[in-house]
Image (cartoon, rainbow, N blue to C red):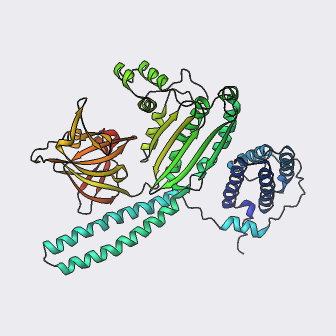
Amino acid sequence: GLPASPRPSEDPSLHSTAAEILAAQKALLDLPSTPEARAGRIASAGQTLEALLRATGRTSDLTSLARAVQQAGAESSSEPLKQWLDSIQFAASAASLPGDAPSGRSPARAGPSSPPQRPEPALAQSLATTVLKVPIGKVDRLMELVGEMVVAKNALPYLATRAESEFGSPELAREIKSHHAVIHRIVQEMQDGIQQVRMLPVGTVLQRFPRLVRDLSKTLGKEVDLIMEGEDTEVDKHIVDALADPLVHILRNSLDHGIESPAERVRAGKSPRGQIRIRAGQEGDRARIEIEDDGRGIDAQAVKRKAYEKKLISEEELETLDEEGAIQLVFRPGFSTSETVTDVSGRGVGMDVVRRSLEKVGGAVSLSSRPGCGTRITLTLPLSMAVSRVLEIKVGGQPFGIPLEDVLETVRVPLGQVHGVRDRSVVVLRGQVIPLYRVSALLGLDRHGVREQEEILVLVARCSGSTVGLIVDGLSQALEVIVKPLDGPLAQLAGYAGAALLGDGAVLPVLNLKELL
């Protein structure tokens, strides 16, 4: 006969789904709420968790759940239920569901003759079949194939040009262009569809932070509320994975150095309870995450002194650097205000670690602070890492690519409007002083044969939180490309993000402005 189907409580996919439901309930209980709303959430969570235990056949934990719900209601606090969830989630992470006994042990209240509980079939079936688990490697492979299709598609316009110029067939050229438009649409839809499969809500990484904040607050003797908004904002799974460590570092710093003790806050006229707010959202093709606290802020003078002591700035910079520039020193490699190593945030590393982690995935970080009011750190990240958009530029007669996300605008500037300030050329655009860099000089390229004009072509870009002007010889077009990292000795070259293969077979070096400058 046919083999028996596994019971829902033995289904691995159901195990994973149940763990996700437990995590979702814990995240809801962690949200700040009024006493009335909290009571409703406790009751609702209790009903959901009871249904989950029955659906999975793990009724041995119903008693402890009921006790936790009753205690939470009596204390008007979700803590007892959170603690129950913490213990249950630990079991789930060990590949067992609520009620599973550790290996070699049996629950004391479950006698050997107790008949197995039958799960509720409707809920169990819905839990087991609504989600299809696919290894991320398979999805990545599909995206790689779409990337190869993008390269092949990009060759068609070159073929159309050759058909008309070399073979004298404008009709064939038009037909190739027509097919290119159709293929472009199909590839775009495939790319978008596969990308959606790789997208995850940022809440999957944020859900661990309420417990982190709660535990560290107790360790530090502080009272802190964590408020999270926009957890449903979706980004590429690889971006979500890259977010975890930087966010943990930022939160630890905020709790240790930013939020004051209750007594200090009261003396400053603040509520004894500090607040950290995480907001996630989408702006165009970028995700934006803000982490803001209402703590003591950053002491710009203390930062400058510490940077000078560590020989990160000169004596002249110590005297002339303004408050905004001083605050940005926290991103310098090797900068840290911690004198000792602690279990919270003092590990001898600073915000440069956060910046480097984000830049590896095409992200950026900026910081603003007001003494006595708090600090805001803003992370911006690409929604996807699969296909990159670059602007092709000409420098010294050679083509290069610049990530389009870094480009703000392009302008032609008369030479008469270029000024010299402290041995550097600058231009004033709409009241903003922008330093100028000639890309050919940064790359060490000879501009022999390039005629000087009465105007310079300036590409205005955003780099590490600052606005810069890049002097280039020409602009070509915006392209969708697959950027591959450089291999071998070429990987040691600074200033390059990688290279991309164009439709005509040419290789386009793609610049990394942060390294180049």
Q: Quadrant of the N terminus?
A: bottom right
Residue 67 locus on image (x, y percent): 87, 48
Residue 18 locus on image (x, y percent): 70, 57
Task: Please report the residue visible at 46 percent of the width from the left and 43 percent of the height from the top.
Answer: 358
Q: Quadrant of the C terminus?
A: top left
Task: Please report the residue visible at 31 percent of the width from the left and 66 percent of the height from the top.
Answer: 152
Q: Nearer the viewer, residue 21 or 474?
A: 474
Task: Please report the residue visible at 35 percent of the width from the left and 73 percent of the height from the top.
Answer: 183
Q: Above or below — where is 194 with respect to 74?
A: below
On screen, residue 228 versus residue 8, left or right, reads: left
Residue 422 locus on image (x, y percent): 25, 29
Count of numbered circles on the image: 0
On screen, residue 18 versus residue 357, left or right, reads: right
In which image quadrant can residue 342 be found? top right
Q: Above or below — where is 117 with respect to 248?
A: below
In which image quadrant can residue 309 be found? top left
Q: Nearer the viewer, residue 368 or 333?
A: 368
- Farthest-out residue, front: 431
Q: Is residue 23 visible?
A: yes
In which image quadrant can residue 49 be found? bottom right
On screen, residue 115 versus residue 417, left or right, reads: right
- Farthest-out residue, bottom: 171
Q: Above or below — where is 272 with respect to 304?
A: below
Q: Above or below — where is 288 with respect to 318?
A: below
Residue 196 locus on image (x, y percent): 51, 63
Task: Please report the residue visible at 62 percent of the width from the left and 33 percent of the height from the top.
Answer: 255
Q: Is residue 95 visible?
A: no
